[in-house]
Amino acid sequence: MGIAARSILDNAHEAFVSMDAGGFIIDWNRQAEATFGWTREEALGRVLSDTIIPPRYREAHLRGLERFIDTGEGPVLDQRIEIEALHRDGHEVPIELTISVVTVGDVQVFQAFLHDISERRRSMQFLASQHAITTVLAESETVEQAVPRLLCVLCTEMGWEFGAYWTVADGPVLECRETWTVSGLDLSGFAESTRRTRLKPGAGLPGRVFSTKRPMFIPKVADDPGLPRRQTAAEWGLTAAVGLPLLAGGEVQGVIECFTRETRHPAPQLVEMMEALAAQIAHFLTILSDRAQLVDRLQRLSTTDELTGLPNRRGWNEALERELARAQRNDEPLCLALLDLDRFKAFNDAHGHPAGDALLRDAAQQWKRLLRLSDVLARYGGEEFALVFPASPIHHALAVVERLRAATPRGLTASAGLAAWRSGDSQEQLVARADSALYEAKRRGRDQTVTAP
């Protein structure tokens, strides 16, 4: 080859590799050195298939070479194709190449220009991962629903075979809450070991990520003495790992770790991409968590009386329905009482609405202290309260109601109507019987309890 041609090849932006009909490398330019890690001197004379072709493709490569020699046909010749090539350190490089055949004298020579398309692949991979993650989060209502699918999407799109989600418990201690394994691969032993493991900050891959708040890539897990599960990982064939912090407000809320059996090159671009994806996941998990808390708060507000903190009419109805179902299921007694503060309107008119509100709060607090945890006291409306006694016979409920009336604050009195549930009574019928008893107590002059027949 002339000096000018050699200079052009050595300064080309694409790798140039030439092979003879025997499969031996006969040319190798500077960009090939940069792409595959072999110097020109090392590469010349080596078998090309053993040098840059991944093992899974070698048989097809040799068959294709034999076919061309026998027939002169080569379906991949003069075609632009994308495939993976092998770097000297064992990791794979996605490349785009075009192969042509030239005849030099009586000898046929195969020439290929190869272009490293890692950056293009990463961009496509990143966009696909972003889209998949966004889809999962848009379809999930809770963190618990989202996490398993997020592990699957992140690991699948980024080419990892095992994923784990770690959260921070009291201590603080990191605990594994979820694992994922690619379909068709048995990593059950490693998954079990991961779920059993508890890590303090700084210990293991999740603990290091938690402490540093930075992602960490480990190319050879078995060689890292700081990993408690390194031996188990090696036994199950896992080689490389990466840990990603899930940051919210500058604090680590969780850690995602991924493992693979394949050799992985610790490329900064890969870690940066996964860190960006983890940031996206953390942001949306925070939104899901905040939304769940808001929904829970709204649910509580919808069933809670703002003034007294007791269940409101809606909360009372839900509680009574639940307790009635339990009484029917377990064939247990149940009693219901309605209590009304006597002459509350006169108190309100004399002392003002703030004093009336304070009286309602005081009554709720004092009465609640005299009840069991299983009893349900609610503000039924205005100055009227409702009370259900699960698993209580009528004489027990009556004694408690009398104690409540005696504890009515600010010198006021209270009237009460009490009814025992009868098999077959509906919720409405039971309330109506207690209400009639309360009306009778008022009619008799107030400050007393009447038991419904």
Image (spheres, rainbow, N blue to C red):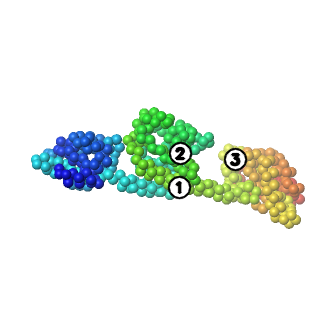
**Is residue 63 visible to us here?**
no
The residue labelled by disc 1 is 284
Q: Is mark 3 on a helix, strand or loop?
A: helix
Please, what is the three-letter code of the amino acid marked with disc 3? Ala
Q: Which residue lies furthest to the left in this view?
A: 106
Check disc 2: other Cα within 10 Å, few if <14, some if 14-19, many if 20+.
few
Q: Which residue lies furthest to the front in this view?
A: 3
Q: Nearer the viewer, residue 26 or 147?
A: 26
Gap between marks 2 and 3 measured at Cα = 55 Å
Residue 276 circle label? none
Check disc 1: other Cα within 10 Å, few if <14, some if 14-19, many if 20+.
some
The residue labelled by disc 3 is 327
Residue 43 percent location from the top left of the image: 25, 42
Q: Which residue is drawn at 87% across and 56% down?
A: 410
The residue labelled by disc 2 is 212
Q: Is mark 2 on a helix, strand or loop?
A: helix
Q: Which of marks 3 and 1 is in front?
A: 1
- Point out the tag, 2 or 3, that comes first from the N-terminus: 2
Q: In which quarter of the image is residue 358?
A: bottom right
- Point out the tag, 3 or 1, that comes first from the N-terminus: 1
Residue 97 percent location from the top left of the image: 27, 52
Gap between marks 1 and 2 measured at Cα = 22 Å
Please, what is the three-letter code of the amino acid marked with disc 2? Thr
Residue 25 percent location from the top left of the image: 22, 43
Q: Quadrant of residue 89?
A: top left
Q: Which residue is drawn at 32% across and 52% down?
A: 116
Q: Residue at x 84, y 65 (%)?
A: 352
| Left or right: 290 as drawn, with respect to 71 | right
Q: Is mark 1 on a helix, strand or loop?
A: helix
